[in-house]
Amino acid sequence: QHTRWAPNLVLLATQPSAEDAVRLAELAADAARLGIGYLVGTESGDLPGAAWAMEITPDGRLLAPLLGLELQAQLLPAVHQRAVVELFVEADPEHDPDGPTTTPPFLVDISEQGRPAVYARLVGPYEIIGLDTPDGDRSALLHEALALLLLHREGVHPRVLSSALWPRGVTEDVRDALLERLRGWLGTDPDGGPRLRTDATGRLVLAKSVVSDLDVLRSLYHEATQGKGVDSRAVRGRLLTDALVLVRGPLLADRAEGRYGWLTHEIVDAQLPLLVADIGLALSAFHLEKDRAEKAIEALGAALRTAPSDERLWNELLRATHATGDADRVRALAADLVARSGARGLPPRTEALLDELLPTWREGAAATG
């Protein structure tokens, strides 16, 4: 359907009750204008109002005769399975921020002594510091290969790298020639070690002296919330501020058309807005502890530029704006949120918060409508 809403797919992990199944059918009947679909697993395969029925066989095939599909399942690698679970945990507004967290797989030295030999800025326009720009038409390909490796500090197999760079296929000699140029471009560390090496499993791995701003961003947030920032308010504020300054836009914002197609399959593209939102929320809380509402609003605004759809940021922006004592600003923000919500309407938590902070907001919304 041609709507202004991006399509959303709601996945149900358990079979609904008969009553809930009827409610889902009613929702689905009116979902076209919002672009929402529902995928429900049932043992019987019988669900009222279902547009399509798909069967998953014991040998891992998916059959959908009405769609003309017969597919064989592929197993998601364990590291990606964990990343998907973590993504949903981080996105859950009810999850305990003080609960168990997963340490990022690659932390960097964020002290003055930890300056990297090669520094790539990926969060926003792509920029590399510490390397000469390669000559010729291969420059873009080398940049893309380095970006892929920086987003996979665990290593990338040459076959995976070549399929990402040349999705339509490439010969081994062309791939190997690129890897040699990439090794030559990255060079060696002062101790003579190559900055691009091959590990025991055959994967291509970057040296720790090659760092991206995303590595630094994760490390700053980790240090602020699980390291030195835990016991020192001043350190926490500095680390969070430094982290938010690094955010210049979406990941690889100036990526060339027709390249970086592999990025659409990378979970980091969805994780980055969550990370930026978490940093913005933490910095906002830091400022509100000392009644610095304007500073909190500034931090939240910076985070919203990268995570504009994060409900938590908007709700915290409402609280920070209310803390200024300026009722007109709160009303203006409420009107902006109502306008942004469109036909879908405000999320329930945002409505409840507005009812608390600005009980008359519905009158303004009705007048605007």
Image: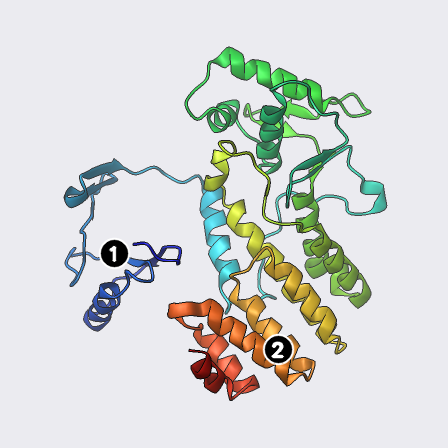
Location of mark 1 (residue)? 41
From the viewer's perspective, tell me whether residue 92 is left or right of residue 107.
Answer: left
Q: How crowded is mark 1: few (under 14 residues within 10 Å), some or many (20 or more)?
A: some
Query: Residue farthest to the top?
Result: 173
Quadrant of the drawing holding the C terminus:
bottom left
Under circle 2, the secondary element is helix
| Rendering coords of residue 347 (x, y %) | 44, 72
Quadrant housing residue 298: bottom right
Residue at (60% x, 32% y) in the render:
149
Q: Where is residue 231 in the image (x, y as percent from the top left)?
A: 77, 65
Query: How far from the left and from the top, in percent, is residue 343?
Result: 38, 69
Using a 10 Å C-alpha cutoff, classify the residue at mark 2 as few (fewer than 14 neighbours), some (14 to 19) or many (20 or more).
some
Count the marks: how many? 2
- Quarter of the figure with residue 130: top right
Q: Which of 118 and 199 is in front in this view?
A: 118
Q: Which of 34 and 166 is in front in this view?
A: 34
Q: Which of marks 2 and 1 is in front?
A: 2
Q: What's the amino acid at mark 1? A: Gly
Secondary structure under badge 1? loop
Q: Which residue is drawn at 44% across and 46% down?
A: 81
Using the rendered image of the protein, determine whether residue 96 is visible from the camera's viewpoint.
no
Decide: is 77 above or below 320. Answer: above
Query: Disc 2 marks which amino acid?
Result: Arg
Q: How far apart are marks 2 and 1 (CA)?
A: 39 Å
Is 84 rendered above or below residue 182?
Answer: below
The N terminus: image quadrant: bottom left
Q: Is residue 40 left or right of residue 177?
A: left
Q: Residue furthest bottom?
A: 359
Q: Residue at x 48, y 48 (%)?
A: 82
| Corner quadrant of residue 206 | top right
Residue visible at 71% across and 75% down in the picture: 293
Mark 2 = which residue? 319
